[in-house]
Amino acid sequence: MKIDEKPDEDYEEVKIEQLGLLDSMTGIMILQSSTGKQFHITAFSAEIAGFIASFMEGKREIPPTIYGMFEQMCEENGLFLVRVKIYESGGIFRANLYFTGKKEVILRNYRSSDAVALATFYNVPILVRKNLLKEQETKKPKNNSLPIK
């Protein structure tokens, strides 16, 4: 697949609808499509949740060390992140990161939470495999959840 091709019909673009903490160590985010279907990601660190919240607020002046290193490597190699695709592999949510620039690069099978953080940092589309999107639930959040954004 070429980077500039239309997205696969198996994927749908999503936005971060909610971001928070299940407990002091675990982040949760709800990604939602334009049709209202949702995809929940949990089991990522509270630290990553905090980074994503900062990026959503436009705070990109001093990126965390790993994202700063990533940004510098991309700049020095003339690469630009253009989209992130999330899928399930062996019961774990993974992501492919698509870059364009001097050449086209696809980084495969990375942690979905880091990919979402980078997509938020660079303000690029996040795509989720359609079979992972579910109709919106109307359950109330647990009392121990702590909203970040």
Image (spheres, rainbow, N blue to C red):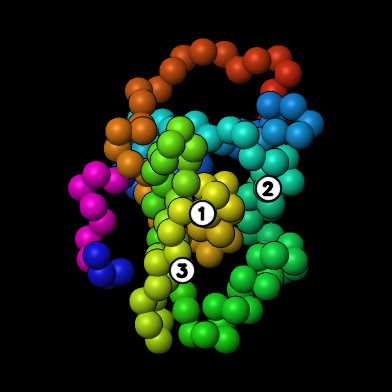
Image location of residue 4, percent across then percent down: 27, 70
Q: Name the residue nearer the viewer: 68 or 56.
A: 68
Check whether the beta carbons of the residues at disc 3 and disc 1 lie within 8 A of each other.
Answer: no
Q: Residue sitting at 74 percent across and 27 percent down? A: 23
Which SS class for mark 2?
Answer: helix
What residue is disc 1 on?
110
Above or below: residue 103 compared with residue 121:
below
What residue is disc 3 on?
81
Q: Give the Cα distance between marks 2 and 3.
A: 19 Å
In this image, 147 relative to 110: left or right? Answer: right
First in residue order: circle 2 vs circle 3: 2
In this image, 112 relative to 58: left or right? Answer: left
Image location of residue 138, percent across then percent down: 46, 14
First in residue order: circle 2 vs circle 1: 2
**Amino acid tagged 2:** Ile
Q: Is residue 10 magenta?
A: yes
Above or below: residue 35 compared with residue 116:
above
- Which stretch is magenta? 5-11
**Amino acid tagged 3:** Leu
Image location of residue 27, percent across then percent down: 66, 36
Farthest residue in the right direction? Answer: 24
In this image, 115 relative to 64: left or right? Answer: left
**Neighbours of disc 2 within 10 Å: few (<14), some (14-19), many (20+):** some
Labelled disc at residue 48: 2
**Neighbours of disc 1 within 10 Å: few (<14), some (14-19), many (20+):** some
Q: Quadrant of residue 91?
A: top left
Q: Give the Cα distance between marks 3 and 1.
A: 14 Å
